Image (tube, grey):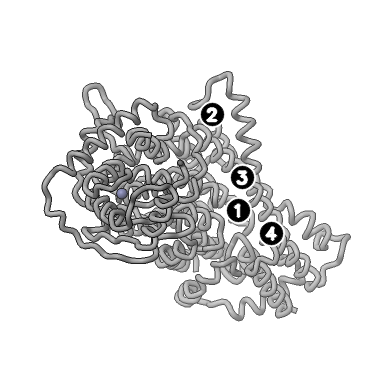
Amino acid sequence: MGIAILVLMAVGVVLMLTRVLPTAFALVFLAIGIALLAGAPLDGTDDSILTGVLQTGSAALASTMLAVLLGSWLGTLMDETGIAGTLVRKIVEFGGERPSIVALGVFAVSILCGSITGSAPAAMLAGVVGIPAMIAVGVRPVAAGGTVLMGISAGSPLELPVWQFLSDALGAPVADVKAIMIKLFPMALVVGIAYVLVRTRRGARHAWAVKLERPKARVRRGDAPWYALITPLVPIVLALGLAVPIVPSLLAGVVYALVTTTKWGELNGRALRSLYKAFQVAAPPIALFVAIGMLLAAVKLPGAKNALTPIVSAISPSGGLWFVVVFVVLVPLCLFRGPLNVFGLGAGVAGVLVTGGIYPLPAVVGLMASYNQVFSVSDPTSTQTVWAAQYAGVRPERAMVSTLPYTWVVALGGMVLTAVSYL
Amino acid sequence: MTDVDLAVRLLRTTPTHENRPESQLREWAGKALAYGDELAGIEDDGEIRVVDREGGAGSRELLLAEHHRGTVTVYSDSLRRVEELARAKGWPVTREALRTAAVAHELAHHLLDVRELNRRLGHTALRFGPVRVRGHVAGAEEIAAHRFAHRRSGLAVSPLLITTALAGGN
Ligand SMILES: [Zn+2]
């Protein structure tokens, strides 16, 4: 039966890869299929398909969905109030004579944006002004797109919604997730800086180039005052430094952004408008989290667990060295919506590793966080990579080739860290 | 449209200037054009490595030429595209003149001193009482390079106008 479930998962990956089904829908069908193969009853018990998988599973990641929504709200505000744009403009004004300085500055802004919200909204927040600004001072288009992506990924260990996701999905306390992420951050930071310096070291490129598609007019926004520019730091400082829970930390950021940029009379209007816009921004990840919750519920069913655990434990590498070697070699499987992408089937794989007791919980968190560092930058099918590459005027595959050597190193670092700390 | 008008438009579409007042952009455009004029009048050996290649014309972007570390790459397919545009517009522009202008544009990037240009533009990024931090003006180099190319190549039409027309702005 375990083999049948694995075959079904492989079919699911093919359906996602070939885009026959959107990832979220494919995961729901997978969840139901796995539950059927695991012999779960239709209804009546907590381990049934209707109650356990569809009803309870759909809301299992509710805290994550709220965190994502609040992150999107904060991101929307940073865009609407000109905070993100002002940050980039200041960087260009101060460093414009040296392309590598501008790129490092946009990289830093991308870290901040990536720590607030993930995926394409973060890329847009930093990249809408940042990417053309970098190209304008002589950074090559591939490197300009890659810089924003590396920055977002370097920010993701600090991204509160990701903490909430790994905590909800794997059942780990937020404090454990935080402990791992804090160690992962410096590695992602150093490798990201290396990427930016290497890719801009070869000197500025100046071109007589004309964009043929007229770019959509950027909305003209006023300047945000200097004290509003620290908005992205507010939730990080609260959650990281003062151990405030995730939702209130993000809410504090929202309030700070609002009161530092908006006149009293306009507060309500702007707050409500940006919140509603945030629902739209957060819709794709929330749909995915509903499906991932169901998938997790399915792989945790007693039947599935009993069928999968022996197989997975037989093929899972034991010992720190083999853990690192095997999972680092498997890095490509997290790309192209592969089975190790934790915002997809990878969540189910992680669920099996946890419920089967194959590795200690923190080790699974570290493993999945390491993969997250790779596909959040280099996966040419993920929305932020597609957006950043196309906005820079290059194909997403070129962004992958440019960044993968670096993100693979970050993953290696994360795996070594995980093996040394938890195995 | 004059070159100043076209240059203001070019600055307006350069990120970081979306919100700047018209008068500010106009002043910068004038100074950048003047710097291009001045640079074109200075004697230089004009020596630069030039490589001709295909592959500059994509569906989203038309890359006429690029400069990197003293080497200029000119894209022949893009020049052909511009020649077609010139014919359609009735501009008396030959491909040879276009190539000369493209090389001159990149030569300008090779010769021009961004710090000096920024000093002339006099943009203040930050002020602490008497202390002023000079700021960079994105896009100004491009204007100076276009004017330089116009002067050196003797092209019948301003490169600024060609650029604007290609972007579908005219
Ligand atoms: Zn140029």
Picture quadrant where residue A359 is located: bottom right
Instruction: Identify whether A303 is placed above or below A240.
Output: below
Give the amino acid at mark 1.
Phe
Which of the marked residues, 4 or 2, is nearer the chain's N terminus? 4
Which of the marked residues, 1 or 3, is nearer the chain's N terminus? 1
Task: Check disc 4 and report the residue beneath it.
Answer: A24
- Give the CA distance from mark 1 to mark 3: 17 Å
Indicate the chain on which mark 1 is placed: A
Residue A332 appears left or right of A12: left
Residue at x 25%, y 21% (from the top left corner): B129
Mark 4 residue crowding within 10 angstroms, few (<14) / some (14–19) / many (20+): many
Instruction: Identify whether A294 is placed above or below A280.
Output: below
Q: Nearer the viewer, mark 1 or mark 3?
A: 3
The answer, for residue A182, to whether it is visible in the render is: no
Give the amino acid at mark 4.
Ala
Closer to the camera in the image, A140 or A101: A140
Q: Position of residue B117 (x, y in %)?
A: 22, 38
Closer to the camera in the image, A282 or A312: A282
Mark 3 residue crowding within 10 angstroms, few (<14) / some (14–19) / many (20+): many
Which of the marked residues, 4 or 3, is nearer the chain's N terminus? 4
Q: Nearer the viewer, mark 2 or mark 3?
A: 3
Indicate the chain on which mark 3 is placed: A
- Give the CA distance from mark 2 to mark 3: 18 Å
Closer to the camera in the image, B170 or A17: B170
Task: Check disc 1 and report the residue beneath it.
Answer: A165
Task: Check disc 3 and report the residue beneath it.
Answer: A281
- Give the CA distance from mark 4 to mark 3: 16 Å
Task: Check disc 2 and report the residue beneath it.
Answer: A258
Q: Secondary structure at mark 3?
A: helix
Q: Secondary structure at mark 1?
A: helix
